[in-house]
Amino acid sequence: MTTDTMTRPAPSPARVATLAALPIALVAGLLAFWGLGGFPGGAKEPSVAAVPAEAPQLAPSPAAVCRALVARLPEELGGLRRRPVTAGGEQNAAYGDPAIVISCGVPSPAVPPEAQLLGLSNVCWFLEERSSESVWRTIDRQVPLRVVVPKSADGSWLVHLSAPIVATVPATDPGEVHC
């Protein structure tokens, strides 16, 4: 028999499917490995470093309210992990990277008459937009709160703070301003 008369059998459909699936599976596996941080420059690990925070001396009553609030805050808020703060762990909390910082017992804000206020789940907020951050301040609480949100962070999770605030920080009459 000559080589001209010999024909090669056609590959089976299972073999063709296997040969096509192998490169796809290899690429998918490499992408998953990279995405989970397996290669340098892969997925970024969230920061666990302490976030800078100030801790002014508080009178006993506001200090007790702040301790109750911070103790009630969860380890994760709106998908952001809690981080340590450099000072005042009993009156400050931080979440995510870039850090969103919650401060309790801050000075009351001066709210201009034309200010737009936002009521979120029984908490009245005054928003100050700055070049690199948004500063949210409560105006209806006996102990004022401030939340600093970097421009690069998503501030939509702010509503998740309402339940701990309502449960621990007593409301007060905000005066002539209304939410």
Image (spheres, rainbow, N blue to C red):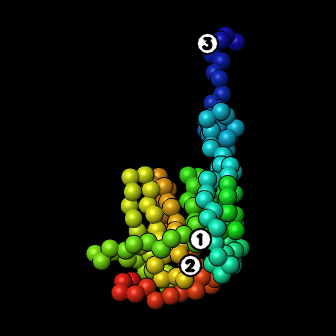
Residue 153 appears in the picture as rendered = yes
Q: Which residue is drawn at 38% across and 61% down?
A: 129
Q: Which amino acid does label 1 sit on?
A: Cys
State the SS at label 2: loop
Identify the residue at image location x=45%, y=63%. Answer: 135
The residue depicted at 65 percent of the width and 49 percent of the height is: 46
Considering only vertical position in the picture, is 139 above or below 103? below
Q: Residue furthest top?
A: 2
Question: Foreground: 115 or 3?
Answer: 115
Q: Name the residue under label 3.
A: 4
What type is the residue that disc 2 sits on?
Val
Q: Which picture quadrant has residue 58?
A: bottom right
Which residue is labeled 2 in the image? 143
> Alpha carbon of mark 1 to alpha carbon of mark 2: how far?
7 Å
- Please report whichever mark, 3 or 2, sits nearer to the chain's N-terminal start: 3
Q: Which residue is drawn at 65% across and 23% down?
A: 8
Query: Tag 2 or tag 1, which sits nearer the N-term?
Result: 1
Q: Which amino acid does label 3 sit on?
A: Asp
